[in-house]
Amino acid sequence: MLEERPRSHGRGLPIAVAVITLVASIAASWSITQPAAAATTATLTVDAATVTGTVNTTLSTQIVWPTIPGTPNAQTRLNTLAPQMVRIHAGTDGGFGNVVLPFNVAGKVLEGGGTKQPWDFAVMDSMVNSVRAAGTVPVMNVRYAPDPMYTCTGNFGDPGTLIDQTYGVFSDYMANLVRYYNVGSFAMPQGGTKTNPAGTANRITWWEIWNEPDYPWENPCTGDGTHPILNPSQYVALWNATATKMKAVDPTIKLVGPAPSNHPSLEAGNYPVDYVPLLLSTATIKPDAVSFHGYGGWDNTQGDRLLFDGSGGGGIKADIDGLANIKSLVAQYAPGTPVWLTETNVSADPGLDPAQRAWNQFSAAWGASLFRAMVVGGLSMIHQFQFLESKQLGLIDPTAGTPLLPYWRDYYLSRYFPVGSPILLSTPSAGAPEVEMLAARQPGGSNVRVLVIDRQVGTTKAIGLPVTVTLNLQNMAGLQSVTMRMLDATTLATLATGPALVTMPASSTQTIAFTGYGAALLEFSSSSPPPSGAPTPTPTPTATPAPIVSSVAPNGGSIAGGTSVTLQGANFQAGATVSFGGSALSVGTITATTITGTTTAHSVGAVTVTVTNPGGQSGSCSGCFTYSSATASPSPSPSPSPSASGSASPTPSSSGSATPAPSGAPTPTPIPIPSGAPTTTMFMPNLTKTLGGPDGWDTPFIVQNVGADPADVLLSFYRFSDGALISEQFVPALAPGTSYADVPVNDGELPSDTQFSLVVRSYGSRVVTVVNQAQGKGDRMQAASYVGTSSGATTVYLPNVTRRFYGYDTPFIVQNLGSATTLVTASFTSFDGLQHRSVVLVVQPGRSGVVDPDYTAGLVDGTQYSVVLHADQPIAAIVNAHNETGAPVAYTTGGVTTGGRVLFAPYAAKSDSDAGLSSPIVVQNLSDSPLDALLEFTQLGGGSQQTFTLSGIGVGGSKVFDPRFTLGTTSPCHGASATCLGAGEYSVRIVATGTAAAIVIPTSSVTADAYAASAAPATRAFLPNVTRTLGGPDGWTTPIVLQAGTGVSTTATLRWYRFTNGALARTQVLTVPAGGALWIDPRTVTGLQDDAQYSVVVDGSAGATITAIVYEHFFGGGDGVMIYSGLPE
């Protein structure tokens, strides 16, 4: 900074010395051109067909003191901002309770007094925890040495210097910080061991050594008051000593520096070689990122013009020139090294600006202009200073935790222009040079996003001058819609929710009226592919591809480490780190597809190998390497898929508490695999046995023979953790029409507290399967159900995936149905279309991989996403949603492989009570252009109809109709109207203008279940498990709901077969009403027995099509409700 960090007692320092030095050092190289007279109109042009570069700039922030836990909403706001990195600016100022750096020995706290005991990490840990809670990556900036390492002993800021001029004490100290976070403990010089209570869970990859070494007052002691404690030569000596010792502890860490207050630095006039060039040219270990700082100004009395353009120093121009010079040095000494701006803001003055420029409309124009300049200049990272301080230097209000305007500025800039966006040719207005713009295409897609900035300076501070902008977009085919968000003075009235999304005319020419300083963000949405002719992915993929780890060779080695390995995969980046089950790989070389290195010590067993790129994205291969006590590598074994990161129970599956009991079918007996090709192969992505403990998730499943001949059935269980085939079981001669039920909790061959994928092969006749998942007992019971699949797809859609959304966690499981290992890319798009993220899984044939959004970096708490899965082998997926807040509930939905323009949902409900049963419906767009979806609700049994439209569902995106609320709002509504569904039970037909998928989620305060709407009603449906009071009067009863697949009434024939012997117990012929659905409760069907299980076959008459669901209900308390869809023939 150009000014001191804000101190708790607000002491003053001779900043004039620093300012004079800066002016003398760089004024000669600058020529400031006064702008032309301000324009009242401007015409801008964007060519959508001409790409001039790529966005490589990431917006981030930082925290200085441990104030997030004590500030209302601060953690939530940081989570929502979701920066890829957060810089922890660790020092010893701010008073005793805010000392972040642990002392190496007991000593006096120079600011505020008191004695600090050695190696107290409590404050630093708190800040690291805040960063990790946001799902992001910390950058640890150790600003300077802790107080006891200096000669001054009076007060913070007294004259003095470092005691050890060889820097051995400081370098040893830094090595111990690395040991604490990356090894988990270290031997304290005073004796004993200091252990990190989090182990290595809070491992820190990125370390910035020192802060503003050119600024005398950025230290507990201020040197001689004229020159800094570390001149460039001294800084490089400290760097060399420190980097060597830190890397010796963990070779995979990444180092950042030298972080001068500007470039050229304040010392540039006194030393012929400045900090950046000397570090790059002479460091024994070169930095992994080169850092510098740059603020608009340093005094609130400075005018708007200086903050933009400088005047002998400062301004955005100083950052532009500094970046250009550093990049030229990087090209000379360390090609490819990224450049970071690790501190920036409107002004470094810590006092509140009377004109409020750091947090009013001026900040929108200034921050957007800086972002644009850094994107064009090729900067890699902007760390805004800082997240939570004051309105002058923060993103949120320090008292209430509400966002300030710069929060929304950075939130939307990072989402409209993610890394990887192709920059488009734009032509500014010759008569309006201070109306700036940046245009880019969404990564992998066709939408064009444009940033327009009014930074015209007037005579009054903070106001700016008005201008009317005409924006012309050229060479964009298939324009569908245009939206805009305005960041200006009007945003100050909506800070709680941010700038509104305004729908503009669907035209390639737009008019934007600025009343003064501000920034406009426009998105032109298109149905056309990119100009290259390549297909547009659906949805837009994440800007920076996540690394993919496909194999490790050799696949095992000694627990002592020392094994030379090669990782194969894709999207590896320079500076990536590699973890073998938490033990860091000593990395040798990195290319885009290979990483070589040497393993370090680890305990015996198979481990997950994880590659993390500098931006924080990671990819894993679970069980791809096995540590053994012998030095020889183990024999080759399957490389399984990853499990959910950080989740104590990776995915809910099921327990057999109140589920259908096994039938009298033969006990499985292991035998050799039958010869010949199977008649049917069914895949179930998730099976468990007492996962989480004795009352944990257990998953009874049912296999029904739906053919005319007996079927031999082979069950193959693959363990999640390592992909191993744990058990193969055989069910011979399953009779036609009968079902076999397996309860894993009663299966002695399967280990407890374990998760499996299951492959079911039948020989001689076709089979179908259904899985019932449950855990807990009584009012803590949860239940969910899904059906197996016999054929997957290379693209699978998940309409509703959430991260900590009103208590819901929705891990999803992907099973490889193919014959070769597959790479699965899961592309997330938030419901508002602005957030994108991708995760990559490596999944072996028949095995499953898991993604848990609650533990996936880059996803935002409180957010709903649509997900699209892409693979090069056929896959299937399920989503296991569970909510442990209050009464625990759960539901499961299957991934959708084929959508349609007309979808059928047999059952939905809305209760008069807010706590009663209601059925949100989520519609996902599977087509290549935005679509509308008409939802037709017909009273169950036929009758009156209400219709509602979800408009403008983006490509790959989702929208929700929640019957509890007025259409398009979150305002509760009651009583039927054009915008409110009346209370009742309904069947639903969804008619879309493109290909769509949908899920229906009937939920209440104590129950939850869900199913996917059908795009293909069939003439026959199989229902493998239907019960009547199974387990007693309050036991499982499973009503069937039938919906006609045409607009006319349909006759349906139901055949009920007993589980025990396959005998036909009852035949029904029923009429399904036109447009409606029919509810069939087994308790009302004559000829059926209580406490009994059946399989049911439903046929539509004369070729008529039907859709069926089974509504499984347990009346013994808890979340005893689940739904599965009938399996069409």
Image (tube, grey):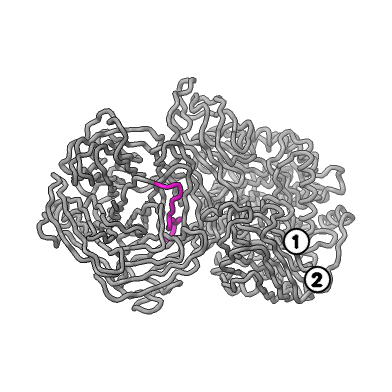
Picture quadrant where residue 523 is located: bottom right
Residue at image mark 2? 431
User: Within 10 Å of the Cα at label 2, are there few (<14), some (14-19), or many (20+) other Cα atoms?
Assistant: some
Residue sitting at x 35%, y 61%? 1001
Establish if 486 lies above or below 762: below
- How many marks do you count on the picture? 2
Farthest-out residue, front:
1102
- The local secondary structure at tag 2 comes to loop
**Residue that mark 1 sits on:** 296
- Residue depicted at 84% across the width and 71% down the height: 36
Q: Is residue 1076 left or right of residue 559?
A: left
Residue most toward the right?
Answer: 28
- Of helix, strand and loop, which one carries label 1? loop
Horizontal and vertical percent position of residue 666: 17, 37
Image point 45% across, 47% down: which residue?
794
Image check: 918 left or right of 607? left
Above or below, comparing residue 1070 to residue 90 in the picture: below
Residue 534 location, x and y as percent? 59, 51
Q: Name the residue rendered at 72%, 51% in the picture.
A: 378
Q: Nearer the viewer, mark 2 or mark 1?
A: 2
Res. 73 visible in picture: no
Disc 2 marks which amino acid?
Gly
Query: Per the image, is 805 magenta?
Result: yes
Prevailing secondary structure of the magenta residues: strand
Q: CA distance from mark 2 to mark 1?
A: 25 Å
The answer to whether 955 appears left or right of 674 in the picture is right
Give residue 639's mark.
none
Q: Nearer the viewer, residue 740 or 97?
A: 740
Q: Over which residues does the magenta segment extend? A: 792-806
Residue toward you, 151 or 326: 326
